[in-house]
Amino acid sequence: MIKLKNVGYVYMQGGPFEKTALEDINLEISEGEFIGLIGHTGSGKSTLIQLLNGLLKPTSGTISIGGRVLGQKGTDMRALRFDVGLVMQYPEYQLFEETVAKDIAFGPSNMGLDPKEIEERVAFAANMVGLKKELLSKSPFDLSGGQKRRAAIAGVLAMEPKVLILDEPTAGLDPAGRDEILFKIKDMHERMNMTVILVSHSMEDIAKLADRILVMNHGRVEMFGTTDAVFQQGQRLSEIGLNVPQITRIMDGLKQKGLPVPGGIYTVEDA
Ligand code: ADP
């Protein structure tokens, strides 16, 4: 469903401060997969996710999503943005409406849907992220940190994207808030058969959720394999600046208990 062929991206191409962010990216992601995206700071993760939802156009190569070729003449880029939902880092900073319900409705309201459909989508999305009905009439500023984060995710979900991209969705949350969000993401993924791409610095989050891991390094794909296979490459991951002690601890914990390594939702403490 998502296909990248020889994709490159250069910031400020041709200028004195030209910077190559991505080079020769080739990959395919199937519908319904859960992908963990990791890599050191500056490895190209955020450039890649902005390419996927059409915020940036590749400077070389082609990207197709669900058969639509990005940037090609005749491709409906508006429809593509609706198909690929992007939850940016600290999305709660973008909450601005007077009620939580209105905030969640903001995206679908821009899609030309009728009010009843919008209302249904808001209720559905709020339920999906576990926000209780009585919170919907409150100001988003009265919510807790975790609730705000969930409201922001609901706003993207209400657009019913086929692909959901989350950039560090648990950053800055306490452990209870983190687990709640991760559980909800896993649940949404399973119940809606949604393709999910999760960017995270937390190897723990990735280990809990991803089917496959895409490892970026200096603008190139370093590895793209099952969670198990990628975490086996501890030494290489360490060389490219990823937190190997954490990975090793997770893998050892799971193996000791004879638990399957990727995919299921569990906490390291359980393992
Ligand atoms: P990551 O998300 O993995 O930290 P980025 O995609 O943000 O990586 O960055 C990839 C490379 O592109 C880095 O070298 C970064 O400095 C550069 N870069 C990112 N955004 C810009 C920009 N707006 N202008 C110029 N260079 C940028």
Image (spheres, rainbow, N blue to C red):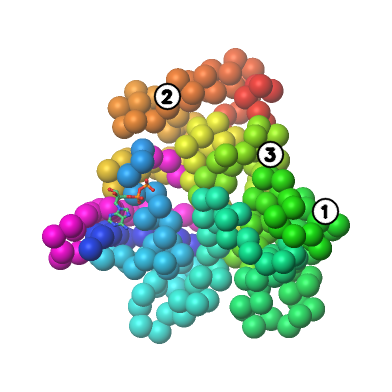
Q: Amino acid at mark 2?
A: Val
Is 23 covered by the magenta stretch? yes
In percent of the image, x 42 and y 68: which residue is there? 54
Q: Amino acid at mark 3?
A: Gly
Q: How many numbered marks are there?
A: 3
Q: Marks 2 and 1, Cα distance to the nearest angstrom? A: 38 Å
Q: Position of residue 133 (x, y in %)?
A: 84, 58
Q: Badge 2 is on which residue?
A: 244
Q: Quadrant of residue 43?
A: top left
In percent of the image, x 72 and y 46: which residue is there? 144
Judged by depth in the image, the label closer to the viewer, 2 or 1, is 1
Between 153 and 163, the one nearer to me in the picture:
153
Image: magenta residue range: 13-39
- Residue 157 visible (yes or no): no
Tag 1 secondary structure: loop
Q: Is residue 240 left or right of residue 179?
A: left
Q: Marks 2 and 3, Cα distance to the nearest angstrom? A: 25 Å
Q: Badge 3 is on which residue?
A: 177
Between 235 and 261, the one nearer to me in the picture:
235
Q: Position of residue 176 (x, y in %)?
A: 70, 34
Q: Amino acid at mark 1?
A: Lys
Judged by depth in the image, the label closer to the viewer, 2 or 3, is 3
Q: Badge 1 is on which residue?
A: 132
In percent of the image, x 65 and y 28: which residue is there? 267
Between 111 and 197, the one nearer to me in the picture:
111
Tag 3 secondary structure: helix
